Image (spheres, rainbow, N blue to C red):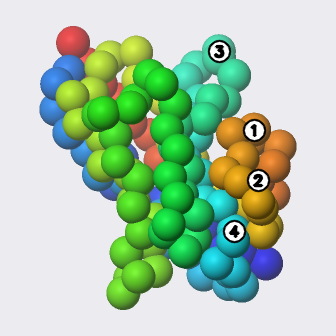
Amino acid sequence: QVHLVESGGGSVQAGDSLRLSCAVSGRTFSRDAMGWFRQAPGKEREFVAAIRWSGDSTFYADSVKGRFTISRDYAKNTVNLQMNNLEPEETAVYYCAASGPRLGLPLSQYEYPYWGQGTQVTVSS
């Protein structure tokens, strides 16, 4: 079992930055994938970014590439998402998720059995 708790959401202006954090506890393996997803009102949950638990591989959705950075903090056992130059359409609940061991970094939410409760990010124009 893996337990995930997100933090760091809030309300910002367009162009601002936010840093989300996901505290991870429980059983993890180096080949697990950790993902960030988001879900806006009335929309499907979408992939944002993923990182292997070992930290040696990352992947981003095209819409956030160059603005968002996913990383691991080994000392704090967290997975972080630095979000820069936020846009109003990125208003959503952001979720942290964990998979079991995988060969690659899954993009589908159905590949992640463990989820946090989500944290709200609101970007106003």
Please give the name of the residue rendered at 69% of the width and 22% of the height, measured from the top-left corner: 44
Indicate the secondary structure of the residue bearing disc 1: loop
Earlier in the chain: of badge 1 and badge 4, it is: 4
**Residue on which disc 2 sits:** 112
Where is residue 64, by image quadrant?
top left
Please give the name of the residue rendered at 29% of the width and 34% of the height, measured from the top-left corner: 67
The residues tagged by marks 3 and 1 sit, at their Cα atoms, a distance apart of: 18 Å
Residue 61 marker: none
Judging depth in this view, the residue of 46 and 12 nearest the camera is 46
99 with respect to 76 (left or right): right
Q: Nearer the viewer, mark 3 or mark 2?
A: 2
**Residue on which disc 3 sits:** 42
Q: Residue type at mark 4? A: Asp
Q: Is the C-beta separation of discs 2 and 4 under 8 Å?
A: no
**Residue on which disc 4 sits:** 32
61 shown above or below 24: above
Q: Residue type at mark 3? A: Gly
Q: Residue type at mark 2? A: Tyr
107 shown above or below 58: above
Q: Is the C-beta separation of discs 1 and 4 under 8 Å?
A: no
Indicate the secondary structure of the residue bearing disc 3: loop
